[in-house]
Structures are given as structure tokens and as C-alpha cells.
Image (cartoon, rainbow, N blue to C red):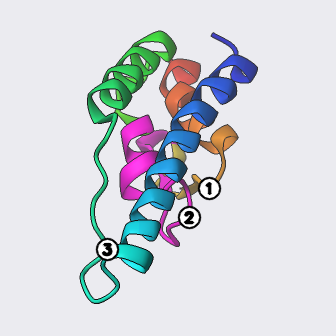
């Protein structure tokens, strides 16, 4: 899979998560403003299966896609990054899908 196709596939996940956020915002703002923002989980089995298939297709053995989506909040976290012993501990940013692509493919490039 090339980067263009990977980016197209990741946009599908991003759009689904944005839709869930909008539903949660609506529920919180209109239906339950005095309560905590709900966790909207419709479609999770499909999203999980899609991520697993995409990870396998691009050889994401380090589970970087899951890291980027959840731990780094789709690259929005100030600490989003990665390193490898071949980089002598130097952190690499992981803000964009291209950064994510590079992290996934770094190990193969040095072997």
C-alpha cells in the first residue's frame, strides 16, 4: 500500500471519530448539559476491525496506528512522537499522517 491509499483509509477513521464526537457534543449540550460528556461507541466493532485490517495491510507491527489515534489524539498531543535505537534517542514528531507513515516504515528501512 502506498502513502496516498493509506491516507485515504485513515481519513475514513478520522471522519468516523469526528461523527462520534459531534453526537457526543449534541447529547451533552442539548440533552444532558449538566452531566458528563458521554462516550459514544456506535460503530466500534467496525472501526476496530478496519484498524486491524489497515494495520496488517501496511505492516504496522509496532501498533503505531493505535498509538496515533488514541494515545496521541490523532497527532494533537504535545508529546506525540516516536524514537528508535537507530535514532540515538532523538524523538521524531508524529503530528501528521505522513509522520505516522514514516514511523510505521522506519524499522523496515534500516533492516
Residue 71 falls in image quadrant: bottom left
Q: Is the residue 21 above or below the residue 34 in the image?
A: above
Disc 3 vs disc 1: Cβ atoms closer than 8 Å? no
Q: Could you tell whether 90 is left or right of 97 in the image?
A: left
Residue drawn at (52%, 72%) of the image:
78
For label 1, the SS is loop
Q: Could you tell whether 45 is left or right of 70 in the image?
A: left
Disc 2 vs disc 1: Cβ atoms closer than 8 Å? yes
Residue that label 2 marks: 76
Q: Could you tell whether 75 is left or right of 33 in the image?
A: right
* Residue most extreme to the bottom: 34
In the rendered structure, which disc, 3 or 2, sits on the residue that comes first in sequence? 3
In the rendered structure, which disc, 2 or 1, sits on the residue that comes first in sequence? 2
Q: Position of residue 89 (x, y in %)?
A: 46, 56
In the picture, the quarter occupied by the N terminus is top right
Residue 85 falls inside the magenta stretch: yes
Image depth: mark 3 or mark 1 in front? 3
Residue that label 3 marks: 37
Q: Is the residue 42 above or below the residue 22 in the image?
A: above
Residue that label 1 marks: 95
Q: Is the residue 32 above or below the residue 26 in the image?
A: below
Image depth: mark 3 or mark 2 in front? 3
Magenta stretch in the rendered image:
65-86
Q: Position of residue 76 (x, y in %)?
A: 56, 64
Note whether residue 83 is visible. Answer: no
Residue 37 falls inside the magenta stretch: no
In the rendered structure, which disc, 3 or 1, sits on the residue that comes first in sequence? 3
Distance between mark 2 and mark 1 Cα atoms: 6 Å
Distance between mark 3 and mark 2 Cα atoms: 20 Å
The one of 72 and 88 positioned closer to us in this rendering: 72
The crowding category of the residue bearing disc 3, from other C-alpha atoms within 10 Å (few below 14, some 14 to 19, many at least 20), is some
Amino acid at each position: 500500500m502506498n502513502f496516498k491509499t493509506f491516507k485515504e483509509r485513515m481519513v475514513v477513521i478520522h471522519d468516523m471519530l469526528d461523527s462520534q464526537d459531534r453526537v457526543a457534543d449534541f447529547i451533552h449540550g442539548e440533552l444532558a448539559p449538566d452531566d458528563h460528556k458521554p462516550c459514544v461507541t456506535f460503530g466500534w466493532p467496525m472501526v476496530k476491525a478496519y484498524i486491524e485490517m489497515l494495520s496488517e495491510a501496511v505492516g504496522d507491527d509496532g501498533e503505531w496506528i493505535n498509538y496515533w489515534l488514541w494515545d496521541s489524539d490523532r497527532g494533537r498531543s504535545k508529546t506525540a512522537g516516536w524514537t528508535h535505537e537507530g535514532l540515538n534517542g532523538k524523538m521524531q514528531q508524529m503530528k501528521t499522517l505522513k509522520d505516522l507513515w514514516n514511523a510505521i516504515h522506519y524499522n523496515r528501512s534500516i533492516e
